[in-house]
Image (cartoon, grey):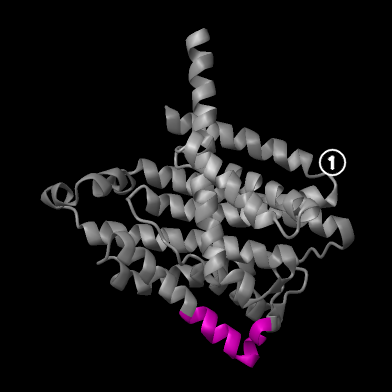
Amino acid sequence: MWADRTIVGVTIGVVLIAVANFLVPDWIRQIGLLSMAIGSVALGLLVLWRSGLISFGHALFYGFSAYGVALLNYLGIRDAFVLVIVSAAASGLLAWGLGFLVRRYRAIFFALLTMAFSMILYGVLAKTERFGSTDGLNVHPPTFLGYAPVDQAAQITLFLFCLLVIYVLILGVQLYLGSVLGQMTMAVRENEIRVEYLGYSVERVIHVKYVISGLLAGFGGAIMALAVGQVDPESMVYWSASGEFVFVAILAGTGNVAAPFLGAVVFEVIRHFAWEHGANLWQLIMGSFLLAIIMFMPDGIWSLLQRVSKRKGKAT
C-alpha cells in the first residue's frame, strides 16, 4: 500500500513540476537540473545505506559517466537519450567490475576503498591532456531524437527530459526495494549470518546493490554534464564531490525514494543563496545547517514530513 502511495505521490509531483517548468525563471530551472543530478547519486547512496554501507567514492561513477557524455559528444553523438543511457550503463559496468572486490568489505573499509577508487580516476583525468587535464572538456547542447531546440526552449526540453529519466529511476528503485532481493537490504544490515542461513549470498546481495547504486550515480553524472555543459575532475571526481553526495543523503534521510531529491533541492537552494550572500562563508553555512539537521532531525528532512503526516492522521 505504501509503495502504491509513493508511486502515486511521485507521479503527481512529476506532473506538477513538469507544468511549473514552463513558468519558472531560468535560474530556478537550473537549480532543478542540478538537484536532479545530485539527487540521483544520493538515491544510489540510499540503496547502499539501507544495507548499512556508505560510500565516500561515488564521485567515481558520477564523474565517469559525465566524462562519458563529453567523450561521446566529442565523437559527434549529440542525442540526449544515447548520451545518458550509454554513459550511465558504462558506470554500471564499472560498478559491476569493482563490486567483486568491494563486496568483501564492510564499515570504514568499504567507505575508504570506494574513495580510493574515486581518487585514482581523479588522478588519471587531472594528469591526462586528452581528457582536458584540470580544465576538463566542453559538452555541446544535446538533441532529442532529432529535435534540436535553441535558447530557452533547449533548457525547457532538457529539464523535461531529465525529469522523465528521474521519474523512471525512482519507479525502478521503488519496485526493486519492494522485491525479495530489495527486502534483503534491512536483513543484511541487521544480521548477515541469518541471511546466509536462509540461502542467500550476502556478497551477491551487496554486489547487486553496488551496481544499482553505481548506475544511479552514472545517471546523475550524465545529467550534470548536460546541465552545465562542461566536465572537469575537480568538481566531478574529487573526494569533495563524494562528500557532497553523502551530505545530501544525510540531509534527506532514507525514509522514501523521493527523499534524496528533496534533500538535493534544499542543498542546492542553500548553496545558491550562501554563494550569493557569503561566498567566503558558504561552507560554514552548509556545515552549520547539516549540524542542525543531525541534532534535531537525525533521520533527515523526510522524517519531518512523516511526523506531519502522522499528526494529521491522528487529528482526523
- Say whether residue 298 is visible: yes
Callout 1: SS: loop
Residue identified by numbered label 1: 23
Indicate the position of residue 105 as horizontal and vertical percent values: 27, 65
On screen, residue 111 versus residue 203, left or right, reads: right
Indicate the position of residue 83 as horizontal and vertical percent values: 63, 70
What residue is drawn where x is 70% and y is 80%?
137
On screen, residue 281 versus residue 291, left or right, reads: right
Indicate the position of residue 270 as horizontal and vertical percent values: 69, 47
Whether the magenta-drawn stretch holds residue 125 is answered as: yes
On screen, residue 171 versus residue 277, left or right, reads: left
Indicate the position of residue 167 as horizontal and vertical percent values: 59, 46
What residue is drawn where x is 59% and y is 56%?
38
Q: Is residue 296 above or below residue 95?
A: above
What residue is drawn where x is 63% and y is 70%?
235
Q: Nearer the viewer, residue 193 or 172?
A: 193
- Magenta region: 120-134
Q: Nearer the viewer, residue 146 or 92?
A: 92
Q: Residue furthest left?
A: 197
- Say whether residue 88 is visible: no
Q: Is residue 234 above or below residue 26?
A: below
